[in-house]
Structures are given as C-alpha cells and as structure tokens.
Amino acid sequence: MHDTGLSARTAGASSSSPATNAGDDVDESKTRKAQPAFVAAAYARLHSPYYAAASLLLLALAAAAFLAGRAFPRTDCPPLRLDARFLSLPDAAAASDFGSLGVPSCRSKTGRTVEWTSKDLLNGLEEFVPIYQTRPIKNNMHGMRFDHSFGLWFMARWLKPNLMIESGAFKGHSTWVLRQAMPNTRIISLTPRHPEKYLKKGPAYVDGNCTYLAGKDFIDFGSVDWEKLLRKHGISDPSKVLVFFDDHQSELKRLKQAHKAGFRHLIFEDNYDTGTGDHYSLRQICDQSHIRGV
C-alpha cells in the first residue's frame, strides 16, 4: 500500500514535468509574490542616508542611557552586598581565602574570637581522611557524607567542649564522628529511634560513653530540663557544651530553645536553600533577598 502511493505520486510528478520544462516563462506568482507599494516605499526610505543616520543616533543614545544607569545606580534600591560589614565580620575576614563569607569563626571558652586558617583546615583534612576510612557505616545513605563529617569533626575538635549533645542520630554516624573528635568527652543523644535498632538490618554505631534518650526514653530537645540534666553530668556552664542538630526541625525554633538553655555552640546539619528542604534553615533565615522581597 505504501509503495503504491509512492508510485502514484512519482508518476504524477513525472507527467507534470514536461509542462514545467516547456514553460520556464510561465506565471511565477506561485513562487514569487509581488510586494505591496507601501512596503517598497518604506524599504526605500529606510535605506536612505538620512534614516540610517537617525537610526544610528537613536542607538547611540540608548547605549549611553544604559551605561549611565549602570554607572549611577538608584539610591533608593542599593544592591545587596555580602561584605564584612553586612555579615558583622572583621574586614580581614572578607579578604580571606574563604571568599565573601569570610573566615569561619567561633567563640572560645574564654570568650575570645577564635579563627582558623586555611592551613588549619588542610592539616585537619590530612588527619581526618584516614580516620574517615575506618567509619563503621561505609554508605551512610540519607545521612552525613565526607564533607559534612569533616566539618563536624573539625569544629568539635577545635572547640574541645566539656559535653556534646546531638539531636537526631539516625544510625549513629554523627555520634561516631563526635567520638573521633573527642575520645573521652561525654555525649547525650536525643533520637526517636535508638541506633541499635538499625544493627538488625545493617551497619550502625552505638557509643559506650553516650547517654541515649531514645525509643521509650526519647524527649524532644525543647522539652528537656537542661539545667537538671547538665548538673547530672557535672556541667555548670552550658556555654562549654557543643550542640549538634540533625533532626529536621525548624532551626529558628531550635536556636531559640538552645539560647534559652544557655547554649552558645550550635551546629546545624541540613542548611537548605530557600525553596528547598523540609524545614526552616539558617540559610533561609539569612536569605535577605527572600525576606526583603528584592
């Protein structure tokens, strides 16, 4: 059926070809349409030297206006700047190797500002790589990977807290990271499901020097009597405690709860961009373009 159609169209084309060849001077209106008179007149005017000069002048004025706008921005709508003044960081921080966000900093136990350098990070990285290779959970799916593990390990070791608290432990990888940073420091872990439950299905980590508020004993971070629990662990100053959050709760809520309890050193794991994630993150809080609507 298909071949027959093609043969019919081919035969039709062949039968019409003699007429086409015999009449090369036939009516060309089928292939070339006559232009209206006003189109021809407009075409002639546009190609005159006067109209060409006017067009070039208008183009030059438009380009000058655009460049002037770039050179003198509106004073009522200043551009956003991520500099040291905006972030309340020292000027030296903004000019550091860490980029426009400046040098990551933290407060020491004496209240002085402690800043690490790129050399400190590289030295820590060389030390952490072989440690990370010994992790009990090789494939921590839906959990922390190498980069976040290094960040937690580095900051915990740098701060040297007297107590470490984690809200949300999952299979125990973050507990293991904290233990590698501080081998002898007590850990309090708040997590709905005890990590030992995951041992039935695969690798997990349970720490022997950790107080687990998990399973039937689980208490939400905001409901804990921290003054009583810290006193039980011999901690009188909550500013010497490191708190790690990986519980997918509003970080603004956790920030207020931690501040109320007197905690000063907080690390949040899931810092989602605006419009992503399953909870309110610090990055979303600090997203000025989203907050101000500019």
Image (cartoon, rainbow, N blue to C red):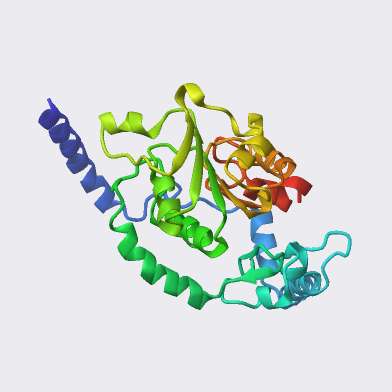
Residue drawn 43% across the image and 28% down it: 193
- The reply, left or right, for residue 113 in relation to residue 209 is right
Residue drawn 47% across the image and 29% down it: 214
Residue 30 seen by the camera: no
- The reply, left or right, for residue 199 in relation to residue 73 is left
Q: Position of residue 63 (x, y in %)?
A: 74, 73
The number of discs equals 0
Viewer-proximal residue among 282 and 176: 176
Q: Quadrant of the N terminus?
A: top left
Residue 274 seen by the camera: yes
Q: Position of residue 259 (x, y in %)?
A: 72, 45
Q: Residue furthest right?
A: 76
Image quadrant of residue 219? top right
Using the image, determine if residue 161 lies above or below residue 256: below
- The reply, left or right, for residue 284 in relation to residue 292 is left
Viewer-proximal residue among 290 and 57: 290
Q: Position of residue 111 (x, y in %)?
A: 72, 64
Using the image, determine if residue 120 lies above or below residue 248: below
- The reply, left or right, for residue 269 in relation to residue 26 is right
Using the image, determine if residue 17 lies above or below residue 63: above
Q: Position of residue 103 (x, y in %)?
A: 62, 70
